[in-house]
Image (tube, rainbow, N blue to C red):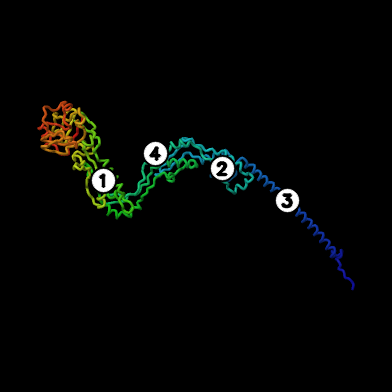
Amino acid sequence: MAEIKEKSPSAENGDYTIDSETSSLISAAIAGKKAAAAKAKASHKKKIIIISCVTAAAVLAAVYFGGWAASMGKFLPNTYINGVDVSKKNISEACALVTEQCAPSNITVIERNGDKKEFSPSDFDYSYDIFGEVGEIYRSTSHSDWLLSYFNETYFETETKPSYDENKLKKLLNRASWGTTPTEDARLVHGENGYYVKEEVYGDKPNKDKLTEYVLSEAAKGNFTIDLEESGCYEEPKVFASDIEADLDALNIKFNYVITYDLGYTTEELTGAQVYEWMEDGGVLNRSKVEKYVDSLAEKYDTFMTARKFQTTNRGTITMSQGRYSTGQYGWWTDREKTVNRLIGLIEKGESVTIEPDYVTLDTGYKYRGFDSARSAEGDIGNTYIEVDLSAQHMWYYENGELKFETGQIVSGKASDPKRKTPEGVYSVYTKSKNYTMKAADGSYTAKCAYFMRISFEGIGFHDLSRSAYGGNIYLTNGSHGCINMKADEVKTLYDMVERGTPVIMYY
């Protein structure tokens, strides 16, 4: 079979035809050019990217190393020393900033009552030098990490402690006034409507030793606002209202009484609330506390064997001693054991009562209980008494402050004989007798008198004795055996005036 070929349009007819082979060659040529153009374009882009990357790297490197260089000589961002932000500060600036914020303008001590005491650091040579340590912190810093520091906080604490003059600070603390209210336990108090609970008191008066120790320790730590409530320098109550409120009703029944001691010119009350404080576990009364109470009464009110101020008639105010124990028997003298035992019995009964203390009573029946009307807050002689000036051989009797009798016609004990000399002191007329026979202790003599007023256990008293003369200086060489000799009519006058128990004051 013959091969048929396509004919291209003839030139004459304007018909251009290309055979398939030619067409393929042209297409290939065009494709080659496109590929070459694309390859050239890709190569260009790659060059641009490489150039861009190199440029960016160069810029980043410049920025990084520029930042590194810029951070040198300063602390990195987000750096804190003792909690103070020292970012981008040099060593000196950082030291100043930390010192300013960590060193005090004043040390402030806060008391329990809220009051504040401030002490200037300059007053006790306070200083806080951390330059060397801040420099060490700076030198330990890796500035190559400057970029990371923007995203991480770094904290440092210095170990350097403040320095100050401890003795000066102690003196400042000791001179300061630190509260006046003492701590008190809750307690039962007796009022008009029975017992009630008086709440505990948190006192503001501190233990100065503990206060000083605490403030010094806090200052050494660099703490400059110091709350004393945490110091342990305040005494805390040991008994609280809540501890005793539950017993209040029962106590109002059991301890609702008052024992009143009548001291003549005044009284002392012992309430059930006070007695309650003397009770131990199990409701047992603590005897030692009862004894202590009775001792306090005796110390406050007893006058026996005490010195007294006395206003004489002619010689001004003198101080009188009691006199010999065996002779000077005037005054009040509490029998402590009897008073304690009686008080315990009254407490057990739980009844309100008014009584006197029990006073010492001798086997002879003499009771150390002075003249009732004489007792006062000022003394126990009063304004009714016998006064004897032994040097002047003169006697006065005052009744309610008014002179009722006086005489210069007496003779006292022989002054030149110590065994017969009348002893000075404070006495009382504790017996009165008529037609009395006096006997010497050694049996060497007896004598009768119409009136005798005994004032001492040794037998000294006022009595009549017939003498050729009285007064003057007779007593120096021809005195009595210790008694006060008087004319019969004068001693009778005195005898009829004077009551038993009347104080007698004799002095030279």
Residue located farthest toward the left when viewing the structure as drawn? 489
Between disc 1 and disc 4, the foreground one is 1
Query: Looking at the image, is mark 2 or mark 4 earlier in the sequence?
Result: 2
- In whole angstroms, how far apart are the C-alphas of marks 2 and 4? 40 Å
Q: Which residue is mark 2?
A: 86
Is residue 383 visible to us here?
A: no
Q: Which residue is mark 4?
A: 177
In the rendered view, does 295 fall on the left or right side of 55? left
Query: Looking at the image, is mark 3 or mark 1 earlier in the sequence?
Result: 3
Q: Which residue is mark 3?
A: 50
Between disc 3 and disc 1, the foreground one is 1
In the rendered view, does 1 fall on the left or right side of 27? right
- In whole angstroms, how far apart are the C-alphas of marks 2 and 3? 42 Å
In the picture, the quarter occupied by the N terminus is bottom right
Q: Residue at x 74, y 51 (%)?
A: 47
The x and y percentages for residue 289 are: 30, 47
Number of other residues with Cα within 10 Å of mark 1, as a class: few under 14, some 14 to 19, many 20 or more: some
- In whole angstroms, how far apart are the C-alphas of marks 3 and 1? 117 Å
Number of other residues with Cα within 10 Å of mark 2, as a class: few under 14, some 14 to 19, many 20 or more: many
